[in-house]
Amino acid sequence: MQNELPLKINYTTLAANIKQWGTKLGFQDVGISDIHLDAAGARLQQWLALGYHGDMDYMAKHGSKRSRPAELIEGTVRVISVRMNYYPPASKEAWSVIKDGERAFISRYALGRDYHKVLRNRLEKLARQIRAEAGEYNYRVFTDSAPVQEVELAEKARLGWRGKHTLLLTREHGSYFFLGEIYTNLPLPVDAEVPEETAVKNHCGSCTACMDVCPTQAIVAPYQVDARRCISYLTIELKDSIPEEFRSMIGNRIYGCDDCQLACPWNRFAQISVEKDFAVRHGLDDVALTDLFAWSEVKFQQVFAGSAIYRIGHEQWLRNIAVALGNAPRSDKVMQALHARSQHASALVREHVSWAINQQSK
């Protein structure tokens, strides 16, 4: 990115317009920050040094680029951060599904269309509107797709504060929203930051609901998650065997985990998404584990085309469901489903099916 700028721009007016355009495009909030992330970068390095990133090698391989936006995209001086609510309308109440061991729980963010595509398209539209107003400029859009410290940038842009579960929180909307960014060379006025100590004291206080509810105790300290213990990591990011010590704790969560958000008092104020793309597809908010376990790879690909779930692949999908079936109430139907996969071509699937059969046989 070169740092060539359009001439004769009122950047204060442009910043105000960007926020209005963003709202019209469906973002619930838009903020602007500088690119100084030295403190956040230091915390990231400490987290990596503890090995809390597990097998997510990409968290470390980009070096300082994650906390230095201008190293990632040359010429960047500002970041436009946005958030968009995702909690799907008319979805089955989450706790009721989690407590029903015969059903599959899928993190509510993944029940609709792939958020990467939805937000990226909207961010591109916003970027084009900026160009129409300001002339040619340099930018890149991101949605959980590059080494970007999006929560820290959103916090700097006053979109919320980092909760003890490490997700961004707001008093008005809780945490059920996606974040996205536009890196730009436009020297826009920034939104004033809330001091970290004030945000923590005033908004999370002494509450530890998210830490207490975590099935695997992955939130090892306030604002610090050991991903190696996190069910979202174990069911999505981890490609190998799920450690046996965590399998029974996973319950029926086959893709992600929302427990820390469900327990957070601020999510009493969470807003239902108005985005049609985030509405529940294929009845995945409340479906039997045995039904999903019977899906062929072709059906998996057909159903999840355009879904965030597609990227884990059918093998990992079966691995996760096998664990959930091992934790399910004992029944002939469950055992029949497991035995039907006991000779699966994948050693990974066979291993987890064998474990599940043993669990069911106890």
Image (tube, helix red, strand yellow):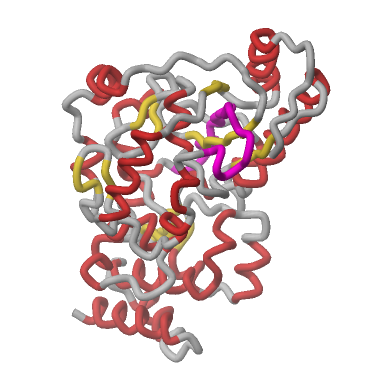
User: Residue 279, can we see it?
Assistant: no
Q: Is residue 254 above or below residue 276?
A: below
Where on the picture, by quarter, is residue 143?
top right
Where on the picture, by quarter, is residue 311?
bottom right
Q: Residue at x 55, y 43 (%)?
A: 71
User: Residue 314, can we see it?
Assistant: yes
Q: How many marks?
A: 0
Nearer to me, 184 or 326: 184
Residue 149 place in picture, x, y as percent: 46, 40
Q: Residue at x 71, y 36 (%)?
A: 2
Nearer to me, 266 or 230: 230
Q: Which residues are magenta?
A: 69-92
Nearer to me, 41 or 47: 41
**Is 180 a magenta residue?**
no
Where on the picture, by quarter, is residue 356?
bottom left
Left/right of residue 213 with respect to residue 75 in the rendered view: left
Left/right of residue 349 with respect to residue 207 in the rendered view: right
Q: Is residue 229 above or below residue 295?
A: above
Residue 257 place in picture, x, y as percent: 37, 51
Q: Is residue 362 above or below residue 12?
A: below
Nearer to me, 265 or 83: 83
Residue 230 place in picture, x, y as percent: 31, 55
Left/right of residue 9 with respect to residue 201 in the rendered view: right
Q: Residue at x 68, y 8 (%)?
A: 13
Q: Is residue 72 above or below residue 58?
A: above
**Is 82 a magenta residue?**
yes
Quadrant the C terminus occupies: bottom left
Residue 320 place in picture, x, y as percent: 41, 68
Q: Residue at x 32, y 32 (%)?
A: 163
